[in-house]
Amino acid sequence: MKFGQPRAMTESRTDMDWQRQTGWAAGALLLAVLGAGTPARAQTAPDDDPVLGTCSLVSGHAQIRRGADDWDWSVAGEEIHSGDRLRTGKLGTLRVDLAGGGLALDVASEAELKSVPLPGKSAPMAAAVLEQGTATAFLDPGTAGLFFQAGSGPRARLDPRGDRPVRFRLDRHGDKLEVAVTEGEGALFASGEETALRAGQVVEIVGGRAGAVDELPGAPAPTAPAFDERFFCPGLVVKLAWKPVASASGYRVQVARDAGFQSLLLNAETAVARAPFAARGPSRYYWRVAARNGAGRLSDFSLPRSLLCEAEPPQDALEEPAEDAVIKYYASSKVTFRWSAVPKALGYRLVIARGPDLRADDALVIPTEQTTATREGLASGEYWWGVYAEGPSSEPIFLAPRKLVLEKARVSTPTRLQQWGN
């Protein structure tokens, strides 16, 4: 496989990004796992209350309130009826699967789900009343849209457009409701007017009317730790860092135990492009960051990066090329990669990428049962590489991805001919 050609995948980039950001694709499995052995609380909804969806994932402090009932802990697998209220705590998250999509509550948020009848339609449409905080919605192409409103304010709706899913974020700021599309395209309907929105665009709804379309700030690019970097855990404080965004007035950084960021350990705001994270024991952690501009608008999150904290001092099994090695070649490049054998490894996976992120779509992946691999024909430039040991799980055998540089050597020619014998 050559760089620039994406690897064959069984799912689209859009779906993968949504799964990374929300963990949606794992809903059925997580439903079975989180709901197993947990009895659903008594259903007190009237028989004529329609079921809008199912609570498919709950993490941390997340509660549900039905009618005049008290707030109760929400459980995965519970049906959500029209009029149910949902809320999350400081590090809690909650997700509801709806027909053709879903709705996820961010930390410290509260929303009510209602059933809205549509003229000429047998099935009602869901409406999210955002009381506070942030909610993220996901809609499949060709499906009905989602109604939403800020508290008792006027109702608006967003419909998916095109042949891709649309993902959008709702942020309530007082009586204002910010609608930001972070994936795909959609059509926003407010006060009888239609506004087209694509990924990276945002509008603010005030008094039921949509304002001018604005652009979201770009997502920050993480710089440290390197992807899958390994650390000795006891007493560890990891310094998270990313490239500053020119228009940013601050950042939101999150750390979780899962790539879907359902089990949050840190959700913090910072004015600088760095943040400390105190590891909570040996584990694999995931982190991401978003930028906030001067108007308070939040970008989409960066793709998650993982880091590993280990109970014993980790060893680097990579041997050659050395870190920052510069390899010169003439007609064609040829690089030999070597590493030490790892006990119980069933094989190895050498990954070569154009950047420090070894999961990039154009990364070159070479499976082998040996502890060496040779690659020819790489173009000039910078590369990062690492090796994973294959077994019950795929684990890195490097401390951090190694950088190497390939340079094409110049061929010098004589400036004048020499006579034979001189």
Image: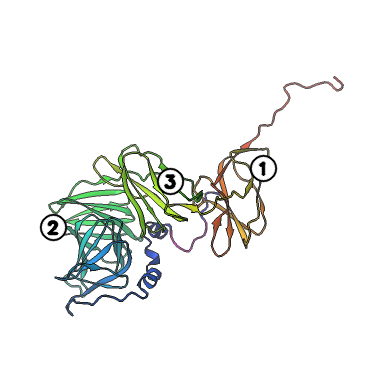
Q: Is residue 176 above or below residue 160?
A: above
- In which quarter of the view is residue 16 placed? bottom left
Task: Choose between 415 and 354: the one closer to the eye.
Answer: 354
Mark 1: which secondary structure? loop
Q: Is residue 260 visible?
A: yes
Query: Residue 171 appears at what percent x and percent y?
Result: 23, 52
Amino acid carrying mark 2 in the image: Pro
Query: Residue 323 appears at what percent x and percent y?
Result: 59, 41
Residue with the most extreme front position: 235
- In which quarter of the view is residue 94 placed? bottom left
Q: CA distance from mark 2 to mark 3?
A: 46 Å
- Residue positioned 45% across, 62% down in the render: 11
In the rendered view of the protein, which quadrant contains the N terminus?
A: bottom right
Q: Is residue 280 above or below residue 239?
A: below
Q: Is residue 303 visible?
A: no
- Nearest to N terminus: mark 1 or mark 2: 2
Q: Which residue is mark 2?
A: 154
Q: What range is drawn magenta here? A: 7-12
Q: Is residue 170 left or right of residue 162?
A: left
Q: Is residue 250 magenta?
A: no
Amino acid carrying mark 1 in the image: Ser
Q: Is residue 156 left or right of residue 245?
A: left
Q: Is residue 363 left or right of residue 346?
A: left
Query: Residue 248 appears at what percent x and percent y?
Result: 31, 39
- Nearest to N terminus: mark 3 or mark 1: 3
Q: Which residue is mark 1?
A: 332
Amino acid carrying mark 3 in the image: Val
Query: Residue 407 appears at what percent x and percent y?
Result: 61, 37
Q: CA distance from mark 1 to mark 2?
A: 65 Å
